[in-house]
């Protein structure tokens, strides 16, 4: 059960925050508003030194170059301290560490960030929340998993590409399972029929 009953909806301005993060084995002050002008993936996770979390964080780190090409940055966030983050990034992957990640790990020791994004549980850890913010800092996508199963990196990239496509093509929308290069739908009653005929006609 989450502690914050406020509904943080897609389309809302993402709550700003400032906190200490670990990046490239150093402590760095991070402010979300400094990322305006870029897309941002906020990656909340329960705790360092656990089981599913390192698989998610390293998976996103491994495809960081692909995400960077989409003018997007990643911020990992948990309620651990920056010292805990640092120790975890100094552990090799084959013993449960995450190694030197390509993006910052933010310390939410006060739990204010997790609470603001409505992912804080009554046990004091964060659910697996994923938020994609546009260049103006508005939430365009949110996904929250329970603690015991991880998120799909490929699907995150697909959704990010769809968000960017419709941003650049405001008269079009992306259908189910859309991939870059595939047909979209013109969001007008008559013109939309071109897409539906191409899919459903014999």
Image (cartoon, helix red, strand yellow):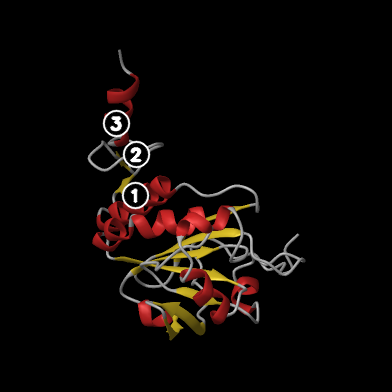
Nearest to viewer (mark 3 / mark 2): 2
Q: Which of these two is toward me, 63 or 180? A: 63
Residue sticking out furthest to the top: 202
> Is there CB contact under 8 Å for labels 3 and 2?
no
For label 1, the residue is: 162
Q: How far across and how far down the image is residue 148, in percent?
A: 65, 49
Lateral position of residue 162 relative to residue 15, left or right: left
> Is there CB contact under 8 Å for labels 2 and 1?
yes
For label 2, the residue is: 178
Observer able to see residue 139: yes
| Distance between mark 2 and mark 1 Cα atoms | 8 Å
Q: How far across and how far down the image is residue 25, in percent?
A: 41, 79
Is 21 rendered above or below residue 98? Answer: below
Give me the residue at 63% from left, 60% from top: 127
Q: How far across and how far down the image is residue 28, in percent?
A: 43, 85
Give me the residue at 36% from left, 54% from top: 160
- First in sequence: mark 3 or mark 2? 2
- First in sequence: mark 3 or mark 1? 1
Give the number of the disc on residue 92: none
Give the number of the disc on residue 195: 3
Is 22 rendered above or below residue 184? Answer: below
């Amino acid at each position: 059960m989450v502690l914050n009953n406020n509904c943080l909806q897609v389309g809302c301005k993402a709550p700003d925050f400032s906190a200490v993060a670990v990046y490239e084995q150093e402590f760095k002050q991070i402010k979300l508003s400094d990322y305006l002008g870029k897309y941002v993936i906020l990656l909340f996770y329960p705790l360092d030194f656990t089981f599913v979390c390192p698989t998610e964080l390293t998976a996103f780190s491994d495809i960081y170059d692909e995400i960077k090409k989409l003018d997007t940055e990643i911020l990992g966030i948990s309620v651990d301290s920056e010292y805990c983050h640092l120790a975890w990034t100094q552990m090799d992957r084959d013993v449960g560490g995450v190694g030197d990640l390509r993006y910052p790990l933010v310390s939410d020791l006060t739990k204010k960030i997790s609470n603001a994004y409505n992912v804080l549980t009554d046990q004091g850890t964060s659910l697996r929340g994923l938020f994609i913010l546009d260049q103006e800092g508005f939430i365009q996508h949110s996904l929250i998993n329970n603690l015991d199963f991880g998120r799909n990196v490929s699907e995150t990239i697909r959704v990010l590409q769809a968000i960017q496509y419709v941003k650049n093509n405001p008269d079009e929308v992306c259908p189910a399972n859309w991939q870059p290069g595939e047909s979209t739908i013109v969001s007008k009653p008559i013109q939309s029929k071109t897409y539906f005929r191409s899919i459903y006609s014999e």
